Structures are given as structure tokens and as C-alpha cells.
Amino acid sequence: GFQINKMLGSTGTVTLDPGFTNTASCESEITYIDGDAGILRYRGYPIEQLAANCSFLEVAYLLIYGELPDPESLALFTRRIKRHTLLHEDFKSFFTSFPAGGHPMSILQSGIAGMATYYDHTLDPQDPAQLDLATTLLMSKVPTMIAYIAKRATGLPLLYPDASRSYTEDFIRMTFGLPYQMQEIDPTIVNALDKLFILHADHEQNCSTSTVRLVGSSQANVYAAVSSGVGALSGPLHGGANEAVLAMLGQIRDSGVSVQEYVSQVKDKKNSVKLMGFGHRVYKNFDPRAQVVKGLADDILERLGGDNQLFDIAQELADTALSDDYFVERKLYPNVDFYTGIMYSAMGFPSQMFTPLFALGRLPGWIAQYRELVADPAQKIGRPRQVYTGHDERQWVPRIERT
Ligand code: ACO
């Protein structure tokens, strides 16, 4: 329902649009969102159908190559990914040389950028074979990296990947290792995490994806672009919200402030407190991902008996906000990350690992968007204009005469 004004080349006018609320930076065939109707589709398929029926790797294939894979293509895609899950032995020391308490998103961002040094035969975005190998390497090695980062934080030994397990199952095994080593990994957890990855897999031109595209528009390699996306994702207004939601719930519980009081503080805009996990730039009715997550959360918490106290606070917050004029008038609803932190926590992930989990889910989206960008002959280097508000010309003054 948009009116589209195409601006091609220099027109002599500049549109000032901070935060790009009205500016499309590209045309894309990957993801469709209708924020008013709460619709999200990848390559035309509704997110609800994909989450109910597909594996994460199947959805990754769909986003990257444009079609759902037939059984043979999926088997080949999976085999190629599994072949490359090991990290170069020297590269492992990279992950163990950061301070153990360093934030996983900072280490992950550096690790992905560092892939360009180990796999420098895959850097040319205009060579389809190189780009395809880089795609495989990212999908293969990022879960191993995230698991190493988690292991390093606990001081436990790093585990090698096991190609006989599914993508998500092996990621869980590598992350937790010892607690799960003696037993089968609970398929309910594998299934729920796989679905969460699907829900996060792409979201058109959000902050991190736009960052990937802007970096890619200079023809920088895909590792440089994706690692920049990780940086953008780390902020609390974007992917960092899942960690911030859990911190907020814990703070409410520990401070003894009632949910009603907390909501009042948010409404007063005191200390710029926000209700984390609420609101979205595009969804103004409901976030379809949040609805699927809520269903999964009920399942997981029932099975794993997660922190029900935090879940209850979350429920009460959601109910209070959804019936409050402040939130209704501003069309603020729970977004995908309102419930994910509670689920990750019930699965055993420490809160610093929540945003890396989002990054792993978003990885195929970033890759697909980068590939679409570099394949588009009409794409130019991204270079926004500005409206200058500084001084007019003034004359230089010798240092001694400056006051
Ligand atoms: N709590 C309280 N008030 C809010 C919230 C919130 N979570 N979100 C928006 N508002 C208010 C704003 O203060 C503003 O009020 P005003 O009109 O009185 O000034 C109004 O709602 C409009 O908000 P904007 O900031 O203009 O909305 P914008 O589209 O720029 O921001 C965003 C969207 C960043 C998601 C915002 O809603 C927010 O900060 N939410 C909390 C963080 C969060 O959950 N981020 C995750 C987003 S989803 C994702 O990345 C997966």
C-alpha cells in the first residue's frame, strides 16, 4: 500500500529522513512485510508455514537461493555445510585470547571479520564460485565460533563439531558439551531453537541488514559486511533487546517494583526507561514472529520448567501494557524478542549468549541480502546525503589568539 517515488541519479533535491522511516534503499525479492496486517513472508512463503514445517537449513536455502530445496538439493547443501564446520586450529586461539568475560558479540564480530584472513580465496563477490564457498563457510563456521565463545566463557574445553548430528543439535552439543555429553540432546530443545532461528532468519532492511548492504555496496567482502551486521545487531534497540528484556525482568523482580509502577516509569519517560521487547518500526499491529514464539515458549517452559517467576512478570507486563492507552495509542506490541530471552534462559543459555543466537538465526538473511546486492547491476555504492547545520565559512585564528 505504498506510493513509490523512484529517485534515480541526482535530482537536485535532498530528502531529510533521519532513521530512514520513509526511505527505501533498494528493491528486493527476499522478504515481504506488511506491518499493519502483521504479515511476514520469506520468498513469498508465510512465516507461520515455514516455522511449522521446515528446518532452519531448508529456510536458509530458500532465502539464499530463492526456492525451497528438493530433497537432493537440501542433502547437498547440508553435506557441504557439514564438511566445513571445523575451524582452522590456529584460528581457535583467536577465540581463547579474548578476556573470558568479553561480550560474545564483540568476539563474534571480530571472528567473522577474521575469516577473511583464513579464507582469502573466497573474497571476490563477483566470482560466483567464491561467493558460494564463502556462503557455505559462514553457515558452517559461525555456529562453531559461537559455541567456542560460550565454552571459553565457562572455561570448559572446546568441542569439535560432529557431522553426524543435525545443524542445530550439534550447535547445542558444542555449546553445552559436558551437561549433554552423556545423554541424547532433548529433541524439544533442538526443535524449538531451530524454529527460533527460522523466525529470525530475515527481516528485510532492518538496521543490521542495511549495514550489511551498505558495507557490501563498496564491494567489501562478505565477511567484512556480515561482521558489520553483527556490530549493528549488538545494540539494545536491535538484537541486543533479547538480553535487555531479561535484564529488565530481573531488575523488576529484584527491585520489588510492581509491574504497574515500572510501566508508569516507562510512560513518564523517566531516565529514558523503555519497555524492552516492545515496539517495532514496521509492525504496528502485532509481530507475527512474537505470536509463534509465545506458543513455543509455553511448550518449552512446561517441559523444562524455566524461570516461571520471570515468565509471570513478562506476562503481567504484556497484559498491563496492552491495555494501557500509552502503548495502545503508539501501537506498541511485544516484538519477537519479548519472549525469546526467557526461552533461551530455560534452555540453559547465559544471557550474554542471547544476541549471538539471534545472529546465527539472521546469518542466512544477511548472506542472501549481500548476494542480491552484489548481483544487482544497478546497485551503486551507498552514500547518503546530509543537511549541513554547522558554521558558515570562518577564518583561521593563530592558536595564541584563540580565547
Ligand atoms: N517503550 C516505551 N515507549 C516506547 C517504546 C518502548 N519499547 N518504543 C517506542 N516507544 C515510544 C517512543 O518513546 C515514542 O513516543 P513519543 O511519540 O511520545 O515520542 C513512540 O513510542 C514512537 O517510538 P519511536 O522511538 O519513534 O519508534 P521507532 O520506530 O523509532 O523505534 C524501536 C522502534 C527501536 C523498536 C522502539 O520501539 C524501541 O526502542 N523498542 C525497545 C527495544 C526493542 O525491543 N528493540 C527490538 C526491536 S525488534 C528487533 O530488532 C528484533
Image (tube, grey):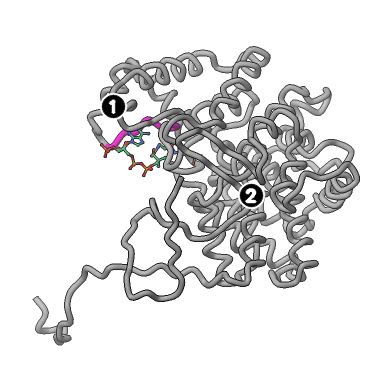
* Vertical relation: 394 (above or below) 8: below
Q: Residues within 10 Å of mark 1 (few under 14, many from 20)?
A: some
Residue at 43% across / 67% down in the picture? 7
Number of on-image labels: 2
> In the drawing, does residue 321 fall left or right of residue 219?
left
Is disc 1's CB within 8 Å of ligand 1?
Answer: yes
Q: Tell me the quarter of the image containing the C terminus.
A: bottom left
* Vertical relation: 69 (above or below) 15: above
Residue 326's tag is 1
Q: Residues within 10 Å of mark 2 (few under 14, many from 20)?
A: many
Residue stretch rendered in magenta on the structure? 272-277
Q: Residue 297: x and y, percent?
A: 60, 21
Residue at 55% across / 61% down in the picture? 213
Judged from the image, the secondary structure of the residue bearing numbered disc 2 is helix
Query: Majority secondary structure of the magenta segment?
Result: loop
Task: State the separation of the CA atoms marked 1 and 2.
Answer: 34 Å
Q: Nearer the viewer, residue 395 or 102?
A: 395
> In the drawing, does residue 135 fall left or right of residue 358?
right
The quadrant where ligand 1 appears is top left
Residue 365's tag is 2
Q: Residue 85: x and y, percent?
A: 80, 49
Residue 112 sits in quarter = bottom right
The kind of residue tagged 1 is Tyr
Q: Residue 148: x and y, percent?
A: 70, 44
Asked if residue 155 lies in the magenta stretch, the reply is no
Residue at 69% across / 67% down in the picture? 117
Q: Residue 57: x and y, percent?
A: 76, 42
Residue 296 sits in quarter = top right
* Vertical relation: 300 (above or below) 7: above
